[in-house]
Image (cartoon, coloured by chain):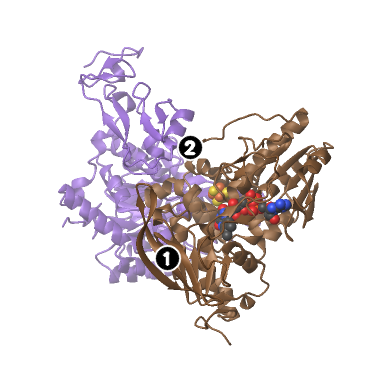
Amino acid sequence: MANNPLTPGIAAGRHSSEVLDRNFADLHPPLDRHEALVAADRCYFCHDAPCVTACPTTIDIPLFIRQIATGTSEAAARTIFDQNILGGMCARACPTETLCEEACVREVAEGRPVEIGRLQRFATDTMMAREGHPYGRAEKTGKRVAVVGAGPAGLACAHRLAMHGHEVFVFDARLRPGGLNEYGIASYKTVDGFAQAEVEWLLGIGGIKMEQGTRLSDGLDLDALIKDHDAVFLGIGLAGVNALRVEGAELPGVDDAVDFIAELRQAEDLSNLAVGRNVVVVGGGMTAIDAAVQSRLLGAETATIVYRRGRDRMSASRYEQDLATSKGVRIVTNARPVRVIGNGAVQEVEFEYTRDGAGGLEDTGETFRLAADQVFKAIGQTLEDAPDALEIDGGKIKVDGSGRTSVPGVWAGGDCASGGDDLTVTAVAEGRDAAEDMHNAILAGREMVIETPRPGE
Amino acid sequence: MANLACEFVGIRSPNPFWLASAPPTDKEYNVRRAFEAGWGGVVWKTLGEEGPPIVNVNGPRYGAVWGADRRLLGLNNIELITDRPLETNLQEIKTVKRDYPDRAVVVSLMVPCVEDAWKAILPLVEDTGADGIELNFGCPHGMSERGMGSAVGQVPDYIEMVTRWCKQITRMPVIVKLTPNITDIRYPARASRAGGADAVSLINTVSSITSVNLDTYSPEPSIDGKGTHGGFCGPAVKPIALNMVAQIASDPESEGLPISGIGGVTTWRDAAEFLTLGAGNVQVCTAAMTYGFRIVQEMISGLGDWMDEKGHASVDDIVGRAVPNFTDWQYLNLNYVTKARIDQDLCIGCGRCFAVCEDTSHQAIAMNPGRKFEVIDEECVACNLCINVCPVEDCITMEELAPGTVDPRTGQDVVADYGNWTTHPNNPGACAAE
Ligand SMILES: Cc1cc2nc3c(=O)[nH]c(=O)nc-3n(C[C@H](O)[C@H](O)[C@H](O)COP(=O)(O)OP(=O)(O)OC[C@H]3O[C@@H](n4cnc5c(N)ncnc54)[C@H](O)[C@@H]3O)c2cc1C
Ligand code: SF4
């Protein structure tokens, strides 16, 4: 083996294939039948269960767990899919520690919640292993709906619309459908090509036509979509990234974390994927964590996350932070990059410490440097390609509680739309709810904008 | 340290924990292991008359009912009496008793309802040196179809008759094992006493079908697609057994009749409960068949510690202690008023108390913002259901309303005096307090 973690610069093959296979195996391995029964037994079947409230898609969790406990996992899966057709991916990707499992009363009682995510995976895997698709379509309505973006929001929307009998046309800019399920979520959360398998399974309902490689604003425009369809849904996510505005940021070796992750997710053979010996990640969210952890798993000698505010302000959950440190990632907080240093390529990054002051974040004046062969920017994604006609709110497409945009006949949901967390499960909820509203609007023959506030707003 | 040694109908054992007549006591090998583990005595698996032994089914003998985490709550069996030759059993009983003289060895018997059958077997048993016999009038399956077991136990006259024969034939103490598959347990107990029994033991198993196989439509355990009723035992039957023990212990007509308590004893606590309700010792089967013989160590330490804590020096001190508090419904104090109280610090917010009270009881729990569950005294009848379904021990408790305070539900003052149904104004047959 030519390379190892100590090989200088950016290099591929720092670990053998065996080590890489082990490193990128399932983070939470599936429960077997016995484990699932034991885990299901712990559910108390709470009244108006807090976990259900905490789930953005409002899955009836106590019911599906009881269905697993009584040996009817496929009924359990139906309970899940009724609310969340991407329940399989959510079971793997949801930060359950800040959603359903955080709310579990056994978390309160014993500090150990019912393993809702893994049980959800057990049920959905059981159903998905079966031939065929569990949902049928209502009688054809003859209505045509366009969905732009095949991420979780778009897919959930398309499925629900197809179920209601509409003909759905999905347009997506990427080579493969799935959005960040395919290009973003950490690979140890969704092994064995699950994202594509899930899309295929979802399309099993029929009535959904997929067109990959078609970009809105580039060969596809909103007016034409509105003209050719009875309704339009935009689930285009956040395709842009924030720039790092410091000296040296253009040096080779300074890359976008999302690109690195997408490349990693698409890599046929991880031993061909290059990574720096010393990796520095700037940011404090899930993307920063995933970039740093996966750098370490690929064989980086060091990976350091540097976040400009305190730990408690990081949007990555405590669990994700602990996961990172358990993989040898160092987390430095209250420091911001001031300069990238290098001669033809990155060599170091200079940071300055910060503190919370009266007028916001202040520099302390104290600086330090970290050796870096590769720097990943994970300082936030931005909306790109949003049609001009749409009203924007806080950098996102403005929508009401039903996902209606400022343009009649156009709905939006997921990361690109205002309100809600940027999570897979939230995108699913918004896509689903928009579909219901579109369905009602299409059948009522009217598409007016009603300002209904979202819960919590 | 409390003394756990026991003398039951003259039979001594180092502790009150005996293994009931059942598979664990079917042969010398098991019984030796039991004694090594610390059991105070055994009732040897039921012997039948001389001749070709009975045969058992060659498929499954047990069915089961499980609780959470697949804990065994109840077991049913369709096993018959011993299927080993009489001579082998007698030989083994003799050696075991010789090697463990300090342990109780009682022999369970079931032979046809004719005096000669008893005349034939009793001397053979006596010859082993066994401490006593137990008449199996309880087994509800298989043998009962042949006129034995519960077929005898369900007819008090037969019980009396056979008991009398046995008392005439042998000098050994005679314990009569009763079946719960009757309407009033006091009648067979009275019949046993009338026949001269030294004691009764109860309960034997409850007739049962544990489940049905929904693929083959056969009751379980299924023998080649067919099932039959079996005898149910284990933790699930304990309440039935406790009640029957208490019925006999408080029946003036059986006063002083020693009782060996059987039915779902699983922990020291269960044993203590049987003892306080009038049992002189306990017999255990399912707990051993679930966890093995070692559980007796927990029973010994638990009972001893509890007796020490309460200041009871010997087992006799606790036997029957709860019997005077076992009464008829009509004598319960209707002036005793309690209300449920939810400890907000212990509450984990599952809301089960709310669900059950709201759906199935008295709408006496409010679900307040922040999942704060609080009792509405105006509605609470103190039924106890919330406590029973709460997953957290001691989170919900019953608090007694002090005399003189007003019960917000009835608007009436809580009365300090005892008052029961017999004198209650709503009782058409109310009689003046004596
Ligand atoms: C690195 C990373 C890790 C993450 N990990 C998690 C996690 O573990 N758990 C979790 O819950 N969430 C996670 N998230 C967030 C989650 O992935 C998103 O919230 C979710 O994917 C949003 O779904 P969406 O459908 O709105 O958008 P996306 O998934 O981004 O899908 C948008 C789709 O639209 C297409 N598109 C974009 N622009 C155009 C255009 N102009 N024309 C046509 N098509 C277009 C894209 O090709 C894409 O297929 C992570 C995000 C990132 C970046
Ligand atoms: S979808 Fe996510 S939040 Fe909802 S129950 Fe499943 S794992 Fe929990």
Q: Residue at x 43, y 54 (%)?
A: B116
Chain with purple colouring = B
Q: Is residue B274 left or right of residue A423?
A: left
Q: Is residue B339 in view from this perspective?
A: yes
- Where residue A361 appears, as percent x and y from the top left, is 39, 52
Which tint was used for chain A?
Answer: brown
Instruction: Give the CA separation, mark 2 to mark 1.
Output: 51 Å
Above or below — where is B240 with respect to A290?
above
User: In terms of image quadrants, where is residue A453?
Assistant: top right
Residue placed most toward the observer, B238 or A235: A235
Q: Which residue is mark 1?
A: A351
Residue placed most toward the observer, A58 or B294: A58
Residue placed most toward the observer, A424 or B328: A424
Q: Which residue is mark 2?
A: A47
SS of the residue at dot 2? loop
- Where residue B238 appears, as percent x and y from the top left, is 39, 45
Q: Residue at x 52, y 51 (%)?
A: A116
Chain of the residue where label 1 is placed in the rendered structure: A
SS of the residue at dot 1? strand
Q: Is residue A383 left or right of residue B230?
A: right
Above or below — where is A193 with respect to A386?
below
Q: Is residue B30 left or right of residue B132?
A: right
Residue placed most toward the observer, A347 or A412: A347
Chain of the residue where label 2 is placed in the rendered structure: A
What amino acid does circle 2 point to? His
Mark 1 packing: few (<14 Cα in 10 Å), some, or many (20+)?
A: many
Q: Is residue A200 left or right of residue B268?
A: right
- Where residue A437 appears, as percent x and y from the top left, is 69, 34
Tell which circle, 2 or 1, labels the residue nearer the N-terminal end.
Answer: 2
Disc 2 residue lies near ligand 2 with CB under 8 A: no
